[in-house]
Image (cartoon, rainbow, N blue to C red):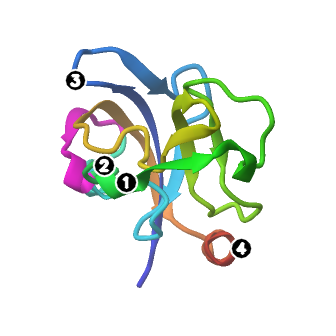
Amino acid sequence: MNRRLLTFHYTLKDERGRLIDTSQGTKPMPFIEGAGQIIDGLEEQLLQMTAGEKRAVVVPPERGYGPREDDLVQKIPKSRLPVAELKVGDQFQTGPDRHAPVVTVMAIEGDEVLLDANHPLAGQSLYFDVELVTVRPATPEEIAQVSREIVD
């Protein structure tokens, strides 16, 4: 398959219209189609656009970060955590592997900590304003780089 490299600008807001993230003021974000670098629901929309086009995109949880899963919220002893100082809202990776889950501290109850391994945006519809900046064939080097990142 001849993969394409696309670049885009985005502004992401939650359902209340609060800003979550934006690429404005920086370089456009690149991704290679089909490489799993961005959420499915956003990639599907960008692949239907032409360079220079702007669009408002709503991504439902199922095509974004998935539904919230209650079994990903657990209490564990503080002594098992890799960090000494904790406060509610802190986030940390659960292991040295860059693919290890990131957890959020939901509550601290004595010697136990309530951790949530759901993605912070799980269960939410995502509201994007996007502009597709460029579309071009991906080079073999770019495809190889993405393949290395997936394996690492």
Magenta-tinted stretch: 52-63
Outermost residue toward the front in this view: 110
Element at label 1? loop
- Do the numbered discs 1 and 2 sit on residues whose CB atoms are within 8 Å? yes
Element at label 3? loop
The quadrant of the rendering that contains the C terminus is: bottom right
Task: Return the x and y of residue 1 as percentages of the image width and height.
Answer: 41, 85
**For marks 2 and 4 on the same chain, the one whose residue lies earlier in the sequence:** 2
Cα–Cα span, label 4 and label 1: 20 Å
The residue shown at (24%, 55%) is 63
Q: Which residue in the structure is indicated by mark 2?
A: 42
Cα–Cα span, label 1 and label 2: 6 Å
How packed mark 4 is, by other alpha carbons closer than 10 Å (few <14, some 14-19, many 20 or more), is: few
**For marks 4 and 1 on the same chain, the one whose residue lies earlier in the sequence:** 1
Vertical comparison of 118 with 27: above or below: below
Amino acid type, residue under disc 2 in the picture: Leu
Among the 4 quarters of the image, the one containing residue 29: top right
Cα–Cα span, label 3 and label 4: 34 Å
